[in-house]
Amino acid sequence: MKAGVQRERIEGYLKFIEFTGEHPRLSRTVLRLAYRVPPLKRALPVSTRIYMGGRILESYRLDRERGEISFAGVDRQIVGAEFPEVVFRNLAQFLGKERAQRIMYEMHFRIMEEQMKKLHYEEIFPRHLAPLFREPVDQGLLESDPSLSRLYGEMERMLLRLLFSESGWGRPEFDSTPVPGKVTVYKSVESVWIRPSAEPVCYAMAGSLAAFVSHIAGKRYTARETRCAAAGAPRCEFAVESET
């Protein structure tokens, strides 16, 4: 993370985010008008469209001839919400529950790790802000610059929204930014499908969260589910810790 974003651009984007939150109807109207002009639509970063009331599916690129879809440079697949449950139960049947849990964690850690590396951040955020996520966060820099810290938090929440909430995995909330100690997840897809259970079941979510935080921090983090909706908790909670 490099210090190079001009002060007026930081303040300008924060004001834009505030405006869209205060005037959602007007923002959606402007977005619909922008969509009628293809060059303008393509020029709008994904986060800008989302703040203005758009949806992530509107930003997917579809190659009908090759049967491929992608988002910000990363190939995607659309599968049923029961997919994690089917994979877990089959792994548990053939390999045992403990090995299945570990595989789900590591598999989704690696998937999210690759996504975070390959994402074209300049398609998600304005070009002058995209470099903030290409490199590990400089927490000292954020602590010394309240406006930049606030903007980074907004952008991090947007990235979580795009990769988790609007991709059907559940809605995660960090207790602090940029690196959380606890993550609360509402409607984790695993807790919905792999229930009831006497113990936590969200190993894919844990692996994905750990990889996300590891990318942000620039070193390996782990995530461990401490409360799970599948086991009767009102929501899922994860403890996030550095491995070193």
Image (cartoon, rainbow, N blue to C red):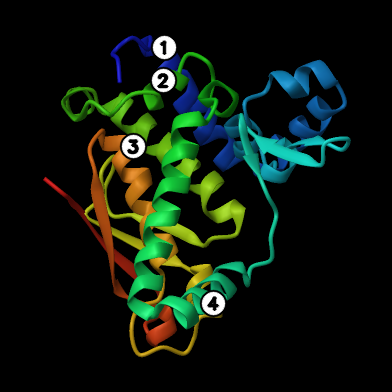
Left or right: residue 78 compared with residue 99: right
**Tags 1 and 2 touching, CB below 8 Å:** yes
Q: Secondary structure at mark 4?
A: helix
**Quarter of the rendering occupied by the C terminus:** top left
* Residue at x 84%, y 21% (from the top left corner): 38
Is 96 or 131 nearer to us in this picture?
96
Specify whether residue 208 is in view: no
Task: Judge the density around disc 4: few (<14), some (14-19), many (≥20) Cα neighbours within 10 Å.
Answer: few
Q: Which numbered circle lies on residue 8?
A: 1
Quadrant of residue 113 within the rendered picture: top left
Q: Amino acid at mark 2?
A: Glu
- Residue 59 x, y percent position in the rendering: 71, 36
Name, please, the residue furthest toward the front. Answer: 94
Give the foreground label among 2 and 3: 3
Q: Secondary structure at mark 3?
A: helix
Residue tagged by mark 3?
215
- Residue 65 x, y percent position in the rendering: 88, 35
* Residue at x 56%, y 41% (from the top left corner): 22
**Quarter of the rendering occupied by the N terminus:** top left
Q: Amino acid at mark 4?
A: Asn
Residue tagged by mark 4?
90
Give the foreground label among 4 and 3: 4
* Residue at x 52%, y 79% (from the top left corner): 89
Residue tagged by mark 2?
11
Task: Judge the density around disc 3: few (<14), some (14-19), many (≥20) Cα neighbours within 10 Å.
Answer: many
Sequence-wise first label, 4 or 3: 4
**Tags 2 and 3 touching, CB below 8 Å:** no
